[in-house]
């Protein structure tokens, strides 16, 4: 890898131990991926949750602090394992709060903005066309690459803060414009587009569509045609959620939407390869995906979850409209996830009061993925959710079982205690 | 103008009196600007401040509510004429807060997110490439068009809400891609570019640069070459502040930055016209711009303000660092403006406290432009600011006099009571 | 007998209005902070009309600058304080001025065929703007 004089100075310790430590790692990463050079970094988004990073993560961050590390770029951080606004509503395991607090403190010392959000790209760390990013979080890197045209891999939790400290990152993967070209083609059936989404169905439909696209593309970059000329932030956010639970890459070239895919030809870097691997997605595929996301046919639900990725203000508003004057059934817990910024707005608009009056809980800073879900919920619990991502990441031995449906279906389940899916049936 | 079936239905009142009223106005606007058709609207940003809209504006919004109007697209709002967190710190005229509150109430009914921010593009209403906007607020439409490639005029405060209620807007000006082409060329001297900006100088320098570009381009679309690729968000925000006090349009094609200006040729729609009107911007131009922006030579300042456009979290951090352990001089008011969203983060990061301890005030939701400034400050008041926009908008008979300088100069003025410019001398 | 000339242009907001001309060749803004809503007096630093009243005048300027709030400020001038101009003529309409005049019912025109409006009309001339017909009648100040 060609290092500039500035890179070499950093590597030789000319900017302190933390930068040197970071550069040593970045050089190894660059070599592993055959990067030819490093590029300037413009924005960072790092991990926060104790459940995932554990004490190793605490040591990692505290070590960076002790070395005098500082992230002096626009930055933000992922949700954490606690909601300090509603601490009494959860049963945290011993030592959890202390572990989480150490991370919160270390991130503050490192200069990371305390956003604790997975949708920071919509409110606190908005990237620009061509910004170089070192971001963790699939839906965020998916949105930034796909919708905004910023450049970044779904960076790992170690490399991301180290790149932030060094302000440099090896140019490979999505950071190299030469790689931002379609590898396969997804054609959406016009009949499906006519029926997809809408009030109460948006998240579940578009997350399911994302999963269909992502499962097909897997480690390739899909070019997607047949989407509407315009898609709402909430629809796109749901679609790109597939980056992590389905697709290992993090760029979808959405023709007519992505700045780098103004035409089908541009998306393929000139012209469409003759033998390009192609799928056509129809209503049947969506129906099938809804079915695959169900793990049980039990109607009685214990928990209802919505807000993965975190809900936007518009989605919080939609949820209060769906709830109306109804109340959550006794014995059912209804969690809605968002970040502190959106929570604050929702409070100002009177939406938090409405949700609390219904007996549901709008949390901040956390979600069930970041929580110790095994000890909190256990394998006997049935969870209904409209999030494909949460459902895929949080299922398996010892974990709760899941039902998948639209927001309307899961709100009804919260109110009646019974999950009765109506979508695509 | 060709109207679609949906337009005709709305014009005929099938969707209620508010939609009909809105469509009637939009048709007149479309005809005045010779629009050929209406397009779907995707995002709205409205005027909020009672100071500017007065009683007529309040009645206008309340009438829309009475007719059952509701925003059909995600909608945020500009700063208002009060700061609910700091009511005791300002002297509001009688009846002002009550009327401003009625505007907020109307917004709630219309479904407007109560952001009260002039930087919606950086949080809570982030536009996308190719999206159609009906936004008031020059710096926001400037950034949305120039940096993000969204499409919208600097919409007037009447047409913006009406377009949001109708969900449609006539396609003219920058909503029509054919008009998004350069008309004049601005070349930045590389020696100037090297010296521009940096900590403590970013906002004043780039707002002054924006003014130079804007005064030259005036009602044309400027193509700007010589900027660094990957400019910081804060730098671009400052440049785009020129859209309103200098540039009457709201698109700058920044070569290497704007998604529609990958090359200078692309910015001009194919090739650079041979006889294109050109401007060369060097350090002398900068020096003159700074001079032009002071309208007094008095050293003693009464008020120091910063945060137009609203400060980002990093800019608040910058103020806190420049203040250090110093305190604001007795008799001097130091006011820093931001929005409630950023204020939440600033509080979490301890910045609000640090600023308060220094004797300065971090406001939310408002700024001097929205406040009844003649009532609050007389013509003898001397204000030092690092905002070209505020300086240009809030000056004239009966209003305070201004000194223009960098943030460092302004902070020093707040601490010592004396404004002593040190930059570009 | 004073000289009367007829000009032709493009209608922005339809209607008929007349009054004494107040003319400049610079951009202007109706925002309250620039032209007070209560009095209709221009208070903009270094502006050629600084200190002058626009009330009841046929206002001639280049185009709209400054805040988009100008439209609602204009509406308030017209509907609450009666401090609006009788009509407006621009070299080229900006949507801020257009939106405000259309909604407030103030006749307005732009793109005068015979030339730049400030070359043809002087402050103090009596001007009748008929934007229904797309004509402007100017009676020169004697």
Image (tube, coloured by chain):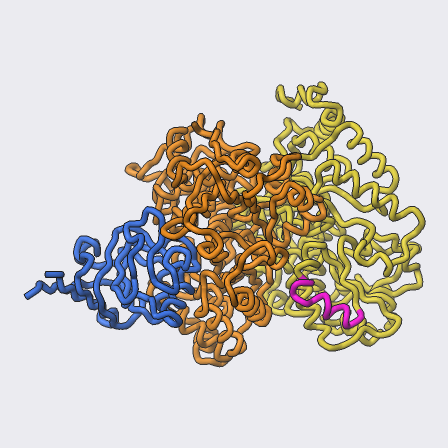
> What color was chain B assigned in the picture?
orange
| Majority secondary structure in the magenta region | helix
Q: Relative to residue A143, is residue A280 depicted above or below?
A: below
In this orientation, which residue lies closer to the viewer: A64 or B343? B343
A221 relative to C141 in the view: left or right: right
Q: Provide residue A79's location: percent of width, then percent of height.
A: 76, 50
Residue in view at x 44 percent, y 80 percent: B12
Residue in view at x 65 percent, y 30 percent: A168
Q: Tell me which corner region of the image, top left, top right, bottom left or bottom right, holds residue A108.
A: top right
B124 relative to A20 in the view: left or right: left
> What color was chain A assigned in the picture?
yellow
Q: Relative to residue A182, is residue A387 depicted above or below?
A: below
Look at the image and tell me in which quarter the N terminus of chain B lies.
bottom left
Q: Provide residue B307's location: percent of width, then percent of height.
A: 54, 46
In this orientation, which residue lies closer to the viewer: A158 or A265? A158
User: Bounds of the magenta span?
Assistant: A346-359
Q: Is residue A272 visible?
A: no
Q: Is residue B308 visible?
A: yes
Q: Is residue A353 magenta?
A: yes
Q: Provide residue B378's location: percent of width, then percent of height.
A: 44, 51
Look at the image and tell me in which quarter the C terminus of chain B lies.
top left
B420 relative to C7 in the view: left or right: right
Q: Tell me which corner region of the image, top left, top right, bottom left or bottom right, holds residue C54.
A: bottom left
Residue in view at x 57 percent, y 39 percent: B329
In this orientation, which residue lies closer to the viewer: A186 or A107? A107
Which chain does blue denote in the image? C
Q: Tell me which corner region of the image, top left, top right, bottom left or bottom right, holds residue A339.
A: bottom right
Residue in view at x 70 percent, y 29 percent: A30
B311 relative to A237 in the view: left or right: left
Q: Relative to residue A74, is residue C49 depicted above or below?
A: below
Q: Provide residue A127's location: percent of width, then percent of height.
A: 60, 44
Q: Is residue B185 magenta?
A: no
């Amino acid at each position: 890898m060609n290092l500039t004089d500035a890179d070499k100075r950093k590597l030789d310790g000319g900017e302190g131990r933390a930068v040197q430590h970071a550069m040593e790692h970045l050089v190894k990463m660059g070599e592993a991926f055959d990067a030819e050079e490093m590029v300037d970094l413009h924005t960072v988004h790092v991990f926060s949750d104790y459940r995932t990073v554990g004490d190793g993560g605490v040591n990692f961050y505290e070590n960076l602090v002790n070395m005098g590390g500082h992230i002096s770029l626009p930055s933000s951080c992922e949700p954490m394992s606690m909601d300090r606004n509603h601490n009494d509503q959860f049963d945290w395991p011993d030592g959890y709060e202390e572990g989480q607090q150490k991370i919160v403190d270390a991130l503050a010392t490192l200069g990371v903005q305390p956003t604790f959000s997975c949708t920071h790209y919509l409110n606190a760390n908005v990237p620009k066309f061509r910004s170089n990013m070192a971001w963790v979080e699939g839906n965020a890197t998916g949105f930034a690459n796909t919708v905004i045209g910023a450049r970044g891999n779904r960076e790992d939790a170690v490399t991301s803060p180290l790149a932030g400290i060094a302000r440099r990152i090896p140019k490979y993967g999505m950071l190299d414009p030469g790689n931002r070209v379609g590898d396969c083609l997804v054609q959406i059936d016009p009949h499906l587009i006519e029926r997809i989404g809408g009030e109460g169905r948006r998240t579940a439909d578009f997350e399911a569509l994302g999963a269909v696209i992502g499962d097909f593309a897997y480690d390739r970059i899909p070019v997607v045609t047949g989407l509407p000329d315009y898609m709402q932030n909430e629809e796109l956010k749901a679609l790109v959620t597939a980056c992590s639970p389905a697709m290992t890459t993090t760029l979808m070239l959405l023709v007519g939407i992505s700045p780098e895919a103004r035409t089908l030809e541009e998306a393929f870097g000139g012209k469409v390869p003759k033998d390009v691997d192609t799928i056509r997605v129809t209503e049947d595929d969506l129906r099938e995906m809804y079915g695959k996301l169900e793990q049980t046919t039990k109607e009685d639900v214990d928990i209802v979850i919505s807000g993965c990725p975190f809900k936007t203000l518009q989605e919080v508003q939609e949820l209060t409209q769906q709830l109306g004057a109804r109340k959550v059934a006794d014995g059912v817990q209804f969690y809605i996830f968002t970040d502190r910024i959106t929570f604050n707005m929702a409070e100002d608009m009177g939406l938090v009061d409405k949700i609390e009056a219904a007996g549901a809980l709008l949390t901040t800073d956390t979600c069930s993925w970041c929580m110790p879900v095994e000890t909190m919920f256990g394998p006997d619990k049935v969870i209904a959710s409209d999030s494909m991502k949460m459902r895929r990441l949080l299922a398996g031995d010892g974990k709760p079982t899941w039902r998948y449906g639209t927001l309307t279906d899961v709100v009804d389940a919260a109110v009646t205690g019974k999950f009765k899916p109506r979508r695509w049936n | 103008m060709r109207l679609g079936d949906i337009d005709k239905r709305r014009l005929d009142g099938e969707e209620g009196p508010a939609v009909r009223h809105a469509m009637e106005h939009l048709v007149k606007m479309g005809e005045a600007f010779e629009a050929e058709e209406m397009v779907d609207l995707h995002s709205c940003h409205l005027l909020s401040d009672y100071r500017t809209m007065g009683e007529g504006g309040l009645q206008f919004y309340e009438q829309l509510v009475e007719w059952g109007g509701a925003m059909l697209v995600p909608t945020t709002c500009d700063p208002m004429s009060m700061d609910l967190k700091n009511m005791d710190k300002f002297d509001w005229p009688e009846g002002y807060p009550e009327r401003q509150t009625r505007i907020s109430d109307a917004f709630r009914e219309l479904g407007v997110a109560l952001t009260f921010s002039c930087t919606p593009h950086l949080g809570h209403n982030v536009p996308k490439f190719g999206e159609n906007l009906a936004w008031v607020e020059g710096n926001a439409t400037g950034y949305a068009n120039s940096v993000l490639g969204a499409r919208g005029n600097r919409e007037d405060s009447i047409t913006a809400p009406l377009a949001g209620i109708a969900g449609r807007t006539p396609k003219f000006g920058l909503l029509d891609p054919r008009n998004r082409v350069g008309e004049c060329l601005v070349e930045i001297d590389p020696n100037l570019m090297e010296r521009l900006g940096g900590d403590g100088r970013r906002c004043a320098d780039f707002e002054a640069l924006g003014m130079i570009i804007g005064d030259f381009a005036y009602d044309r679309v400027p193509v700007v070459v010589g900027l660094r690729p990957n400019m910081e968000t804060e730098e671009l925000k400052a440049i785009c502040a020129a859209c309103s006090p200098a540039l009457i349009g709201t698109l700058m094609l920044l070569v290497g930055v704007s998604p529609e200006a990958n090359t200078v040729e692309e910015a001009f729609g194919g090739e650079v016209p041979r006889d294109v009107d050109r401007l060369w911007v060097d350090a002398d131009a900068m020096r003159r711009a700074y001079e032009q922006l002071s309208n007094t030579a008095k050293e003693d300042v009464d008020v120091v303000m910063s945060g137009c456009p609203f400060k980002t979290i990093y800019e608040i951090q910058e103020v806190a660092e420049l203040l250090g352990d110093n305190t604001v001089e007795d008799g001097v008011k130091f006011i820093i403006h931001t929005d409630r969203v950023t204020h939440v983060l600033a509080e979490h990061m301890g910045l609000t406290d640090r600023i308060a301890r220094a004797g300065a005030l971090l406001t939310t939701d408002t700024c001097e432009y929205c406040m009844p400034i003649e009532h609050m400050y007389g013509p003898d008041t001397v204000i030092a600011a690092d905002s070209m926009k505020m300086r240009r908008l809030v000056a004239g008979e009966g209003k305070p006099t201004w000194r223009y300088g960098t943030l460092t100069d302004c902070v020093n003025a707040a601490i010592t009571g004396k404004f002593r410019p040190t930059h570009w001398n | 007998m004073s000289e009367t000339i007829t000009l032709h242009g493009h209608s922005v907001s339809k209607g008929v209005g007349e009054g004494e001309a107040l003319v400049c060749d610079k951009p202007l803004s109706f925002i309250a902070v620039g032209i007070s809503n209560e009095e209709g007096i221009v208070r903009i630093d270094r502006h050629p009309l600084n200190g002058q009243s626009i009330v009841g005048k046929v206002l001639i300027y280049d185009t709209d600058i400054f805040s988009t709030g100008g439209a609602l400020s204009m509406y308030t001038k017209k509907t609450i304080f009666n401090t609006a101009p009788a009509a407006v003529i621009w070299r080229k309409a900006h949507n801020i001025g257009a939106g405000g005049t259309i909604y407030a019912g103030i006749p307005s025109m732009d793109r005068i065929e015979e030339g730049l409006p400030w070359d043809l009309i002087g402050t103090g001339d009596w001007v009748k703007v008929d934007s229904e017909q797309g004509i402007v009648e100017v009676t020169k100040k004697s």
